[in-house]
Image (spheres, rainbow, N blue to C red):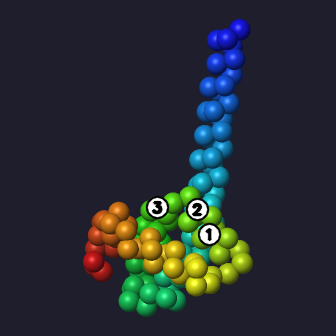
């Protein structure tokens, strides 16, 4: 009986993790338009051909709470908070490393 309960609990946790991962990926896809808009408008030094690489690096290095904020901005519009979130993510060492790899002409 105890083994059955443990197995069921493990299966439930696995299912929760899969749902959370799917939700995270959906949020990251939704956030892309807001990040692209912020970079295109507020970071004019980024060449147009590299905006996609910058967007990818920002999305890849955003924490879950930041992804939610960025996804929300893709629906209700970009504001100063959105710009601040993108700027904060761009300043991180991991994001800088990503940019050196994916947008080497700018760094």
Few, some or many residues within 10 Å of mark 3 (<14, 14–19, 20+)? some
x, y percent for residue 104: 28, 74
x, y percent for residue 45: 38, 89
Q: CA distance from mark 3 to mark 2?
A: 13 Å
Quadrant the C terminus occupies: bottom left
Residue at 40% in and 78% down: 50
Question: Which secondary structure lies at badge 1?
Answer: helix
Q: Nearer the viewer, mark 3 or mark 2?
A: 2
Question: Which secondary structure lies at badge 2?
Answer: helix
Few, some or many residues within 10 Å of mark 2 (<14, 14–19, 20+)? few
Question: Which secondary structure lies at badge 3?
Answer: helix
Instruction: State the residue lying farthest toward the front.
Output: 2
Q: Are marks 2 and 1 in contact (CB under 8 Å)?
A: yes
Q: In the image, 69: left or right of 90?
A: right
Which badge, 3 or 2, is on the more N-terminal residue?
Answer: 3
**Label 2 belongs to which residue?**
65
Q: CA distance from mark 2 to mark 1?
A: 6 Å
Disc ID at residue 69: 1
Disc ID at residue 60: 3
Number of numbered discs: 3
Few, some or many residues within 10 Å of mark 1 (<14, 14–19, 20+)? some
Examine the rendering and report whether any part of residue 97 can be seen.
yes
């Amino acid at each position: 009986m105890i083994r059955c309960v443990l197995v069921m609990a493990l299966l439930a946790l696995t299912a929760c993790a899969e749902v959370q991962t799917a939700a995270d990926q959906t949020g990251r896809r939704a956030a892309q338009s807001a990040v692209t808009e912020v970079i295109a408008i507020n970071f004019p030094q980024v060449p147009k051909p590299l905006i996609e690489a910058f967007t990818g690096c920002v999305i890849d290095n955003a924490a879950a709470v930041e992804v939610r904020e960025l996804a929300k901005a893709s629906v209700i519009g970009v504001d100063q908070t959105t710009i601040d979130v993108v700027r904060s993510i761009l300043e991180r060492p991991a994001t800088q490393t990503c940019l050196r790899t994916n947008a080497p002409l700018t760094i």
